[in-house]
Amino acid sequence: MGGNRMLHGTQALLIREANESDVAALVALTAELGYETNPDDVRKRLAEMVAAGDRVVLAECAEFVAGYVTIHQTRFLHCPPTGRVSALVVTEVARSLGVGARLVVAAEQIARAWGCHRMEVTSNLKRDRAHAFYERLGYSQSSKRFVKNLD
């Protein structure tokens, strides 16, 4: 991301790519999202995502990781690729301060650079605050999602 900085109160917000040294912060933030994991799994998944071309981008404020977004692209035969926010989380103390919006902007910039013609995100039906957040950013509900567990 080249280290975009944004003033956030009296501190600068740095938007940057996640790396292996961020694993502990990624584990803690993922738990805040409601998914328990461990450092070994996160380290492995981060490496797999990066190898597959996905991106994991952090918002850091004074050496404190305030949130992350993961970005994926889905390719189709019938249209250009679609960018997808596959996860977005901002730590509780940094919510409603613009961190999430800045991470979504970064995700959209990445998707545009990939040649994506649209951006999508899914959000659990119970996450009303997240739904309102995405609507404020111009996202709208456009389809129904069907899921089948394979295990």
Image: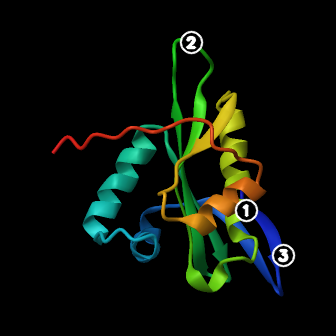
Name which residue lies at 34% across and 62% down.
42
Crowding near the residue tagged with mark 3, few <14, some 14–19, many ≥20 C-alpha atoms within 10 Å: few
Res 7 visible: yes
- 2 or 1: tag closer to the N-terminus: 2
Label 3 is placed on what type of residue? Answer: Leu
Residue beneath disc 1: 101
Q: Say if 127 sits above or below 143 in the image.
A: below
Residue 14 horizontal/vertical position (percent): 71, 69
Residue beneath disc 2: 78
Q: Give the alpha-carbon distance from disc 2 to disc 1, as whole Å.
A: 30 Å
Q: Say if 25 sits above or below 74 in the image.
A: below
**Which label belongs to residue 7?**
3
Name which residue lies at 53% across and 65% down.
127
Task: Indicate the quadrant where residue 26 lies.
Answer: bottom left
Label 2 element class: loop
Q: Residue furthest left?
A: 151
Res 1 visible: no
Crowding near the residue tagged with mark 2, few <14, some 14–19, many ≥20 C-alpha atoms within 10 Å: few
